[in-house]
Amino acid sequence: MIVRSLEDVKGTEREISGVNWTSRRLLLRSDKMGFSLHDTVIRAGTSTEMHYQNHLEAVYCIQGKGTVTVVETGEVLPIERGTMYALDQNDRHVLAAETTMRMVCVFNPPLTGPESHDECGVYPLIEEPVTTQRDRTALTAPRI
Ligand code: 9YT
């Protein structure tokens, strides 16, 4: 079982910030769960265009309020505490935070750790093999 708190993650390499957000990545691909799980804070008054072409993302708002706009249709959806949106069509979208928003985000495939948006709001798909602690131990442990 994996037990990890937000405090464990803050200030480590699992904490990644964009201009408008900070993402604390509680689970990553190396945890081998098949998804990554993030606690993300979006700064109040900001607007961020994103387009996860390589990942599906579900976002559950647990604090604050704002809107998400589907770029293709122009539809504007209110998001507040208790609302979830899932980008099941890899939808290009704009998240506007009226107040500070706190989101629980799940990515499939899982992020590996350092991903941040490129100029198009995309996260790259990183495909190096996962090395686990068990693998590292196997490589370094003396043979007996
Ligand atoms: C809500 C949102 O997508 N914010 C950008 C950060 C991303 N969710 C992440 O890496 O946690």
Image: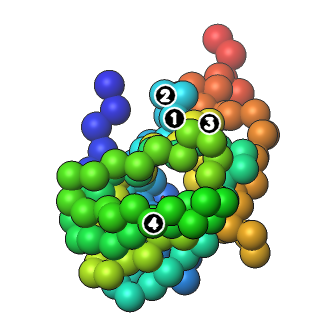
Quadrant, the N terminus: top left
Of labels 2 and 4, earlier in sequence is 2
Q: Residue 60: percent from the left, percent from the top?
A: 33, 50
Q: CA distance from mark 3 to mark 1?
A: 6 Å
Tag 3 near tag 1, CB within 8 Å = yes
Disc assigned to residue 35? 1
Tag 4 near tag 1, CB within 8 Å = no
Q: What residue appears at the point 57 percent right and 66 percent down from the top-left corner?
A: 74
Number of numbered callouts drawn: 4
Q: Amino acid at mark 3?
A: Pro
Q: CA distance from mark 3 to mark 4?
A: 27 Å
Disc assigned to residue 109? 3
- Residue located beneath label 4 in the image: 76
- Residue located beneath label 2 in the image: 33
Q: What residue appears at the point 54 percent right and 28 percent down from the top-left corner?
A: 34
Q: Residue 55: percent from the left, percent from the top?
A: 64, 44
Q: What residue appears at the point 63 percent right and 42 percent down from the top-left corner?
A: 89
Q: Nearer the viewer, mark 4 or mark 1?
A: 4
